[in-house]
Image (spheres, rainbow, N blue to C red):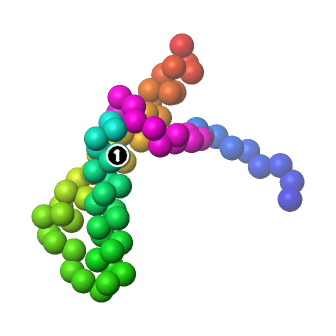
Amino acid sequence: MGEAEFNGVLVLQSFRPDQFFGAEQQKRLSELMELWRKARDEEKLFPKELQAELDSLVEAELNATAKRAKFLMQQQSE
């Protein structure tokens, strides 16, 4: 296959609470995902208010991932 050049940062998430996404957020995200899967499997509609909360937590986790990566890059450059 030959050599390939990689210019990037690889971040492995430990899925532990941290300063960017806390334990309560993780717990609630897990609960909502479980409810969402149950609704999907039973072919039921997922309540809009729960979907909005789930979407918000997914976005918060995505933002936390970006912040975590930035933090790690700053730590590495010091």
- Vertical position of residue 59 compared to residue 65: above or below: below
**Residue positioned most to the right:** 2
Callout 1: few (<14), some (14-19), or many (20+) C-alpha neighbours within 10 Å?
Answer: some
Is residue 58 visible in the rendered image? The answer is no
**Residue positioned most to the bottom:** 43
* The magenta segment: 10-20
70 magenta-colored? no
Task: Say which residue appears at 47% left-offset and 35% top-offset.
Answer: 69
Please give the residue where the numbered disc 1 appears in the rendered image: 26
Task: Say which residue appears at 34% left-offset and 64% top-offset.
Answer: 34
11 magenta-colored? yes
Task: Say which residue appears at 77% left-offset and 49% top-offset.
Answer: 4
Secondary structure of residue under mark 1: helix
Is 45 situated left or right of 1 in this image?
A: left
Q: Quadrant of residue 45?
A: bottom left
Q: Quadrant of residue 64?
A: top left
- Measured as percent of width and height from the top left, residue 66 is found at 40, 40
- Vertical position of residue 77 compared to residue 32: above or below: above
Assign the N terminus to one quadrant of the image: bottom right
- Measured as percent of width and height from the top left, residue 72 is found at 50, 27
Task: Say which residue appears at 35% left-offset and 28% top-offset.
Answer: 19
